[in-house]
Image (cartoon, rainbow, N blue to C red):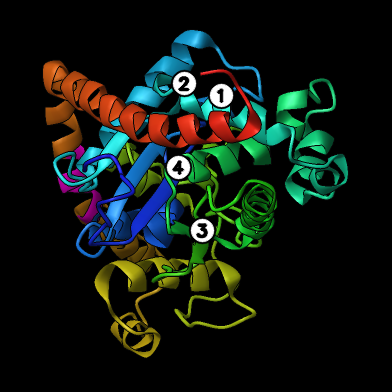
Amino acid sequence: MEPKSESKAREKKLIFSGIAPSGTPALGNYIGALRNWAALQDEYDCIYCVVDMHAITLRRDPAELRKKSRDMLTLCIALGIDPERSLLFYQSHVSGHAELAWILNCFTYMGELGRMTQFKDKSSKHEDNINAGLFTYPVLMAADILLYNVDLVPIGDDQRQHMEICRDIAIRFNNIYGDVFTVPEAYYGKVGARIMSLQEPDRKMDKSETANPNNTIFLLDDADTVISKFKRALTDSGSEVRFAEDKPGVSNLMTIYSALTGRTMPEIEAEFDGAGYGKFKLAVGEAVVETLRPIWKRFGELTADKAYVDGVIRASAEKASAMAEITLNKVKDKVGFPA
């Protein structure tokens, strides 16, 4: 992927997506979004970024953050991100993210940031560490996107506010200084099923789960762990495999099975008619294992090939930095920084 220039229009629209190294992605992340990342490369130019700068709004053990960041980047390749077609790098390796974020801070209002529900939610959970970075998180996110003049940003419902403030910042800057930033659009592509916790099916499966690991299938869990977690999964009274509002545990397992096998709910109900929960839970676990097996294999190969992964990180960061420099130079000139 070459740096954007004024004279050379892109043939494909450009997409940016970032993922935080706050934990190993969960099965819910995979079904809901990650398995579609590779497919996006066929239609779009893609920039994928491990947003390690966002991760430090919470205190992190440095060695653990480094490992989780590398595992996340390596896992992205294992999931099908092709470094020959897409950029894949650490946010912290491109200084333009932080540099543009500071400038955009000066074009963002306190009231806008104070309305962000994610700030309110995280502040309530981490009252001992309500830092300025947590408050200005959406500005750094806007910088991530505007730095590359991307056209589209895949988002979920929980990111709508952040996307709106990104667009507001871009429009505000452009109104003052002219056509500087591409105003990005939210991308609502094919969204996978919403996967719930195995032990608490009234809440979403979360990759940051620490209180009870049995709630979540992490993509790097081994086969025995996956099967064990499904055997322990919460079901409902009775023994009938049926998709219904009054059977949230079984319905969640059916959703997972359907997402991975392509079977419809009526087909699943027929397949396990009279089988009982034990056989059904084992079948769901085995379907997950078969889905993840090639990912585990590829992740192991990449982990062993340190030179290859290092080369991907270095080459992508160099290309991303070149793209970022074009935007930064224009922004610096517009606001009046000396050349």
* Callouts 4 and 2 close, C-beta under 8 Å: no
> Looking at numbered disc 2 in the image, what kind of residue is underneath it?
Ser
Secondary structure of residue under mark 2: loop
Q: CA distance from mark 3 to mark 4?
A: 15 Å
| Residue 90, image x, y percentages | 39, 27
> Picture quarter containing residue 24?
top left
* Callouts 3 and 2 close, C-beta under 8 Å: no
| Residue 263, image x, y percentages | 29, 80
What is the total number of numbered labels drawn onto the structure image? Answer: 4
Q: Which residue bears the numbered disc 3? A: 184
Q: CA distance from mark 1 to mark 4?
A: 18 Å
> Looking at numbered disc 4 in the image, what kind of residue is underneath it?
Gly
Q: Magenta stretch: residue 294 in it?
A: yes
Dot 2 alpha-carbon crowd within 10 angstroms: few under 14, some 14 to 19, many 20 or more: few
Instruction: Give the residue drawn at x 48%, y 31%.
Output: 328
Instruction: Give the residue drawn at x 45%, y 37%.
Output: 327
| Residue 144, image x, y percentages | 51, 39
Q: Measured along the vertical axis of the image, is residue 262 above or below residue 307?
A: below
Which quarter of the figure is the N terminus placed in? Answer: top left
- Give the mark, 3 or 2, whose residue is nearer the N terminus: 2
Magenta span covers which residues?
291-296
Q: Nearer the viewer, residue 146 or 199?
A: 146
* Callouts 3 and 4 close, C-beta under 8 Å: no
- Give the mark, 1 or 4, whose residue is nearer the N terminus: 4
Q: Which residue bears the numbered disc 2? A: 95
* Callouts 2 and 1 close, C-beta under 8 Å: yes
Q: CA distance from mark 4 to mark 2?
A: 16 Å
